[in-house]
Image: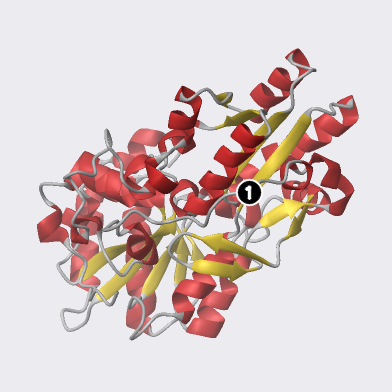
């Protein structure tokens, strides 16, 4: 397969579905978590769940960097922009994420703060060059995938001597989140039989970092691509591992992911960043070794060091189930706010805002069918 249409071929999808149905044992359940929000949207957009046998269900994981960013970090960014009168630059998805007291970056911008939406780190550098008399802060966010561009921006700023550029760093690491979800599986968490590993993240870190999932927790992992046939083939690979009693890390996305990942990018990240002792994730709490900060050698470009701020502790919106949805213990339709009043036009939580959020996927592709597609997960929170 080399071209996009081949990964959406109806005939191949039908035959894959028949194979999965034939090989899935009727006497057991197959509860597969798709870690990445891109997988969630592929499942809903192409109706993959409809092609699965009734005892195979997909459980949505925390794989959306905007969704897992805690409200306190949005509050911090708003305080940074308003208390120090800096130019704050970030990606579009973050602009409407609710902060405390129904604020958001977009509302802060409407109130007069200089907050700008950018498409790449090069935009931030350009704004800094064009405005030498203003401090420009990049609100950096994302999993391992988006970290190298931030590192390049930091090195470029240093090389050019840009003293009005700094980074508010919110890059997070996926293995720690997986560790937490699996550590709480069981009576206090979600029951999982297998995991569809993230695609883009794995192109950078490779498949090796997931070995602990199989070795420590006895849960098989298949690194899966984003197209519908990728997801279906990965589900079949997990079904076969579970039927055989195997527990391994397999790679379905071989056209992009290797075992060792992108070593050049990894070296760049190691040079520019250090691992934070702990970092808060929405829904998962404070996780050890789960995020990055600028290395001490670049501390002068760290916005948290350059612009200390004060703000009140964040308060989650009453009734919003985003934290439980991100842990996989509830689905979007379990939330009383879903659909009314929480919609993409009036988001109450991050999962409805982000283009990779589970609530956005339910709303865009499956809100009228969701009730019949509920994964067989018992809510425990």
- Percent coordinates x, y for residue 11 in the rendering: 21, 45
The quadrant of the image that shows the N terminus is: top left
- Percent coordinates x, y for residue 331 in the rendering: 25, 61
What number of labels is visible?
1
- Percent coordinates x, y for residue 212 in the rendering: 58, 77
> Taking 311 as reference, is 34 above or below it?
below
- Percent coordinates x, y for residue 143 in the rendering: 57, 51
> Taking 94 as reference, is 324 above or below it?
below
Nearest the viewer among 24 and 349 is 349
Visible in this render: residue 380?
yes
**Residue appearing at x 83%, y 47% in the figure:** 299
The colour scheme of the drawn protein is: secondary structure
Nearest the viewer among 380 and 199 is 380
> Taking 8 as reference, is 296 above or below it?
below
Q: Is residue 281 left or right of residue 32?
A: right
Under tag 1, what secondary structure? loop
Q: Is residue 251 left or right of residue 258?
A: left
**Residue appearing at x 82%, y 30% in the figure:** 157
Q: Is residue 205 left or right of residue 351?
A: right
Visible in this render: residue 229?
no
**Residue appearing at x 20%, y 48% in the figure:** 47
The quadrant of the image that shows the C terminus is: bottom left
- Mark 1 is surrounded, within 10 Å at the Cα level, by few (under 14), some (14 to 19) or many (20 or more) other residues, namely few
| Residue for badge 1 | 310
């Amino acid at each position: 397969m080399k071209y996009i249409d081949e990964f959406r071929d109806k005939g191949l999808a039908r035959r894959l579905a028949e194979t999965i149905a034939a090989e899935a044992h009727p006497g057991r359940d197959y509860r597969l978590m798709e870690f990445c929000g891109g997988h969630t949207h592929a499942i809903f957009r192409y109706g993959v769940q409809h092609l699965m046998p009734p005892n195979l269900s997909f459980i949505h994981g925390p794989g959306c960097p905007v969704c897992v960013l805690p409200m306190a970090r949005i509050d911090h960014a708003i305080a940074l922009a308003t208390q120090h009168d800096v130019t704050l630059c970030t990606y579009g998805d973050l602009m409407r994420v609710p902060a405390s007291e129904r604020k958001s970056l977009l509302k802060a911008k409407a109130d007069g703060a200089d907050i700008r939406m950018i498409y790449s780190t090069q935009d931030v550098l350009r704004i800094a060059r064009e405005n030498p008399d203003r401090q420009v802060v990049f609100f950096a966010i994302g999993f391992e995938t988006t970290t190298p561009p931030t590192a390049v921006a930091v090195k470029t700023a240093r090389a050019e001597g840009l003293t009005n550029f700094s980074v508010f760093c919110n890059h997070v690491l996926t293995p720690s989140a997986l560790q937490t979800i699996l550590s709480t599986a069981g009576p206090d968490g979600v029951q999982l039989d297998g995991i569809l590993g993230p695609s883009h993240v794995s192109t950078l870190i490779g498949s090796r970092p997931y070995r602990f999932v199989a070795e420590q927790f006895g849960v098989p992992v298949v690194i899966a691509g984003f197209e519908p046939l990728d997801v279906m083939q990965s589900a079949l690979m997990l079904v076969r591992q579970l039927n055989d009693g195997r527990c391994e890390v397999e790679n379905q996305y071989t056209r992009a992911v290797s075992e060792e990942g992108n070593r050049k990018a990894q070296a760049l990240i190691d040079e520019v960043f250090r691992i934070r002792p702990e970092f808060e994730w929405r829904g998962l709490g404070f996780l050890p070794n789960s995020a990055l900060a600028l290395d001490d050698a670049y501390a002068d470009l760290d916005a948290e060091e350059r612009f200390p701020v004060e703000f009140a502790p964040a308060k989650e919106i009453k009734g919003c189930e985003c934290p439980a949805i991100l842990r996989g213990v509830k689905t979007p339709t379990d939330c009383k706010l879903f659909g009314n009043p929480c919609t993409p036009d009036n988001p109450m939580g991050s999962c409805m805002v982000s283009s990779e959020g589970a609530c956005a996927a339910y709303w865009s592709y499956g809100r009228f069918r969701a009730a019949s597609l509920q994964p067989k997960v018992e809510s425990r929170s």
